[in-house]
Image (cartoon, grey):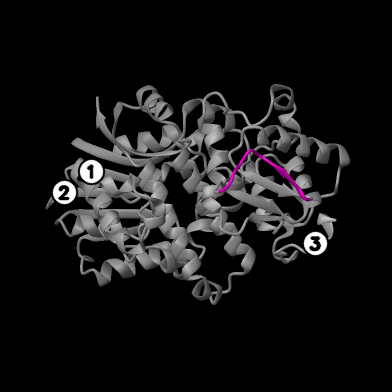
């Protein structure tokens, strides 16, 4: 029986208690199998389980193999938001030999981006989703204390680990490849990443009009690549973050770049910043703010703008209807990667800025394909550098978690389910 075949990977229960196989429920297991059969009717991929295949994938289409069907179905039936990803972390399934994980996840993401096929389940099954859909836990609240804890869990994970797969600028957001964004991902190369990241940083600074003498606030500064680039133009920069280890490395990188006299790094919540600035910049931070605090976030940006000043926000976004449908669910990404996170829509950003501030938001650039390429490069690099990352104390389950996260995100951008936009905010 397939259930008796050892998994390719088995997580350490003491280290990963959330991955312990759930108690089997024959009724729910049957429901999960029925869902797979339904999905497989028009899924251009192949799922092999218990010597049977599901899906309409043909030769050359992505394929996956389920090593342990029982735990796999139990996880799917217990938690609709996390079960599929948890089954991968636990080693219950793998891409078939020759299938890239991102290519495999793409058909699933395309169902969400396709208006007619957006719902994975038939209507009768959708009415029962509440049985297996969980809400975001209260401890992930993004007040000041909660935000600090949520951000630290990801960005203070290990500076050394991030350094292994990011490019030398340590820029942890979508790069800007221009025409190469839509080139075959099989050609994506680590060698092209730094130039694309610098192009992205320059595009933000150009949009904000940053020049010599400009006063710049960088909210959620990461490892200071944008702050350094702005200072190299002659700007005066205040860079803030609430990730303590990240701040320490940011300060060291600023010193190594010779711009310590122009950049101040502060361990500070965006709600506590004071002063006026000609440009306020914030790159892919809004996803960690939380819906309850979006009005507070944009109000803080407006309050920091000097007369005539502008803000540029780069944000991961999703279709508005999907945001509304999923905003109260507890997803795999929230559970394992970004606690407290929620991806907004362009519409909600415009609505919030209109209703709660005197700002107006204008989309300058879409970077969805660029992000897919960025993520493929990061994932390839992560795998290539895994021996160095493992030497830092991370185990094989962590490797699978990050491979799934990067591939899952790549599939979202490739399908159009996710996008990444640069927005210009000006005072009305």
Tell me residue 342's x, y (percent). Answer: 51, 39
Q: How many marks?
A: 3
| Residue designated by label 2 | 214
Q: Nearer the viewer, residue 122 or 202?
A: 122
Identify the residue at the far bottom of this view: 391
**Considering the numbered disc 3 on the image, is that residue within a helix, a strand or a loop?**
loop
The span shown in magenta is 51-59
Q: Nearer the viewer, mark 2 or mark 3?
A: 3
Magenta region includes residue 56: yes
Question: What is the chief secondary structure element of the magenta stretch?
Answer: loop
Q: Does residue 331 sit above or below 88 in this rendering?
A: above
Quadrant including the N terminus: bottom right
User: Which of the two marks, 3 or 1, is nearer to us in this view?
Assistant: 3
Q: CA distance from mark 2 to mark 3?
A: 63 Å
Classify mark 2: helix, strand or loop: loop
Examine the rendering and report whether any part of residue 272 can be seen.
no
**Residue placed at 30% from the left, 28% from the top?**
359
Instruction: Indicate which disc, 2 or 3, sits on the residue closer to the N terminus.
Output: 3
Who comes first in sequence, dot 2 or dot 1? 2
Marks 2 and 1 sit apart, C-alpha to C-alpha, by 7 Å
Q: Are marks 2 and 1 in contact (CB under 8 Å)?
A: yes
Real-space Cα separation, disc 3 to disc 1, in angstroms = 58 Å
Report which residue position mark 3 lands on: 5
Identify the mark at residue 279; answer none if there is no mark: 1
Asked if the stretch drawn in magenta spans residue 353, the answer is no
């Amino acid at each position: 029986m397939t259930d008796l075949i050892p998994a390719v990977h088995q997580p350490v229960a003491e280290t990963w208690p959330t991955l312990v196989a759930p108690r089997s429920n024959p009724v729910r297991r049957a429901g999960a199998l029925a869902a797979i059969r339904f999905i497989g009717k028009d899924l251009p991929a192949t799922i092999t389980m218990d010597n049977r295949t599901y899906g309409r994938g043909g030769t050359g289409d992505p394929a996956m193999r389920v090593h342990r069907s029982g735990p796999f179905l139990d996880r799917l039936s217990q938690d609709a938001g996390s079960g599929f990803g948890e089954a991968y972390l636990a080693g219950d399934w793998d891409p078939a030999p020759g299938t890239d994980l991102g290519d495999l996840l793409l058909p699933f993401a395309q169902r969400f981006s396709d208006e007619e096929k957006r719902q994975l389940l038939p209507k009768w099954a959708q009415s029962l989703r509440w049985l297996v859909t969980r809400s975001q836990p209260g401890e992930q609240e993004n007040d000041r204390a909660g935000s600090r804890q949520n951000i630290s869990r990801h960005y203070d994970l290990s500076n050394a680990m991030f350094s292994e797969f990011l490019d030398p600028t340590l820029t942890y957001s979508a790069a800007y490849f221009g025409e190469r964004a839509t080139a075959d991902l099989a050609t994506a190369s680590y060698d092209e990443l730094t130039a694309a990241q610098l192009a992205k940083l320059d595009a933000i600074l150009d949009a904000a009009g940053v020049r010599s003498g400009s006063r710049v606030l960088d909210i959620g500064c990461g490892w200071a690549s944008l702050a350094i680039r702005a200072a190299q133009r002659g700007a005066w920069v205040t860079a803030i973050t609430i990730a303590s280890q990240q701040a320490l490395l940011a300060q060291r990188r600023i010193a190594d770049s010779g711009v310590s006299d122009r950049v101040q790094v502060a361990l500070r919540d965006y709600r506590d910043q004071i002063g006026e600035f000609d440009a306020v910049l914030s790159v892919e931070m809004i996803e960690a703010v939380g819906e309850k605090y979006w009005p507070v976030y944009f109000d803080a940006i407006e309050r920091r703008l000097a007369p005539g000043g502008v803000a540029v926000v780069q944000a991961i976004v999703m279709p508005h209807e999907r945001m509304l449908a999923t905003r109260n669910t507890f997803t795999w990404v929230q559970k394992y990667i970004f606690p407290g996170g929620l991806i907004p829509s362009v519409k909600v950003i415009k609505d919030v800025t209109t209703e709660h501030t005197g700002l107006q938001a204008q989309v300058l650039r879409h970077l969805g394909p660029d992000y897919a390429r960025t993520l493929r490069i990061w994932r390839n690099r992560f795998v290539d550098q895994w021996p160095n990352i493992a030497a830092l104390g991370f185990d094989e389950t962590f490797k699978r978690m990050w491979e799934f996260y990067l591939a899952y995100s790549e599939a979202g951008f490739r399908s159009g389910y996710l996008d990444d936009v640069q927005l210009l905010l000006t005072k009305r």
